[in-house]
Amino acid sequence: MNRASSEVTGFSELIQRFERNISIQGKSPRTFDNYSRHVAAVALHFGKIPTELDPEDIKDYLFELQQRSKTPSQTYFKHTVFGLRFLLKAEGLPYDFLHLPAIPKVKKLPTILSRQEVWRMLQTAQLLKHKLLIGLIYGCGLRCMEVRNIELHHLDFDRQMLHVVQGKGQKDRYVPLSEHLIRGLKTFISVENPTQYLFNGNQNRNIEEIDQVSLNRPDFDSRYSQRGVQWVIKTISKKAGITKDVHTRTLRHSFATHLLEDGVSIIMVQKLLGHERIESTMEYLHVCQLSDQKPHSPLDTVFALCSKNANPK
């Protein structure tokens, strides 16, 4: 970003407008940081701001990215296209100004853990902190960002509720806290004595290792890192012998699916997840097993009805 601002004429002004317009649209700073890096890479590659480029130049650049990508999802390619789309929208220009390609949405069913697998993860975790991370993400249906953002005053033990503040889309919501979680949380707080955030990332580091200047910076982030949370979930799932590809979102998917299987209405699950659109929640109907209509193979029915007549007298 800094390099593009200093080397490419007009980039600094362009990116300032980009940041302003993304903020006005209600997008998070993280969205700006992600897309602006890709826009900066395009500007540095050509030595021009993207809005001054010929569509054929963009096609050549995207083709090169596509050929370099070794992952099936081609994440870098897609984020470059999305970043350029946001930029054009911020500048009041249509997508076809740069002939940007359509990115088809890949429909994939979420990975769901069984209740036994969730239990194995909780039993495998040795540290109380790790048990609580698993318990909160699964038991409250939290996103990784949301569990990192929990502050002490968000915990209402009397009402057995957690206040999720400014989740995705800058929305607040309340979710129920399990009695088991509350007992663990009270123990953890009494031992660790956190002052603001429930989970801090520098608990095991000597204070001398942290730059005092950084500590005094208003933007210093003492929360448990996103990478740290993801590492905990990934590592413990493997130690628990779970062969599925488990991420933080896997626990959230499992939360929604298990609630639907328990008979909780889809409208309530939508509210607990913080989904804006009911269609997002309805995707879990494809993977949940409702007690009155649990899917089965018709071959089982054939055997049940016909096996007794399989060997005629």
Image: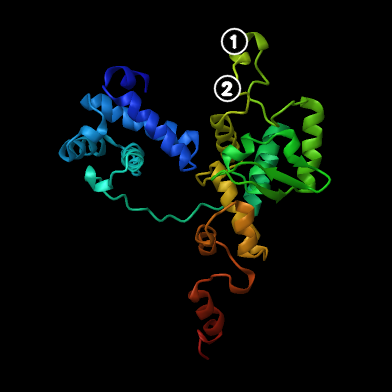
The amino acid beneath tag 1 is Val
Describe residue 90's horizontal placement relative to residue 137 as left or right: left
199 relative to 313, above or below: above
Report if the CB atoms under discs 1 and 2 are less than 8 Å apart: no
Label 1: which residue? 213
Q: Position of residue 299 (x, y in %)?
A: 48, 75
Frontmost residue, 80 versus 128: 80
Q: Position of residue 162 (x, y in %)?
A: 72, 44
Question: Which quadrant, please, contains the N terminus?
Answer: top left
**Image point (55%, 47%), residue name:** 250
Residue projecting furthest to the right = 158
Q: What residue is rendered at 38% in x and 34% in y?
A: 18
Q: Nearer the viewer, residue 12 or 117?
A: 12
* Residue at the limit of the structure toward the bottom, as seen here: 313
Q: Which residue is denoted by mark 2 in the rendering?
A: 219
Counting labels gives: 2
Please provide percent x and percent y for residue 295. 54, 70
Q: Is residue 163 above or below residue 213?
A: below
**Colour scheme employed for the rendering of this structure:** rainbow
Determine the image quadrant of residue 208: top right
Q: Which type of secondary structure does the marked residue at label 1 adopt?
A: helix
How far apart marks 1 and 2 lie (CA) works out to 11 Å
- Which quarter of the picture shows residue 163? top right
Q: Is residue 113 visible?
A: no
* Quarter location, residue 22: top left
Q: Please tell me which residue lies in front, 199 or 297.
A: 199
311 vs 243: above or below: below
Q: Which kind of residue does numbered mark 2 sit on?
A: Asp
Q: Which mark is residue 310?
A: none
Badge 2 density bin: few <14, some 14–19, many ≥20, Cα 10 Å: few
| Residue under the point 62% across and 28% down | 224
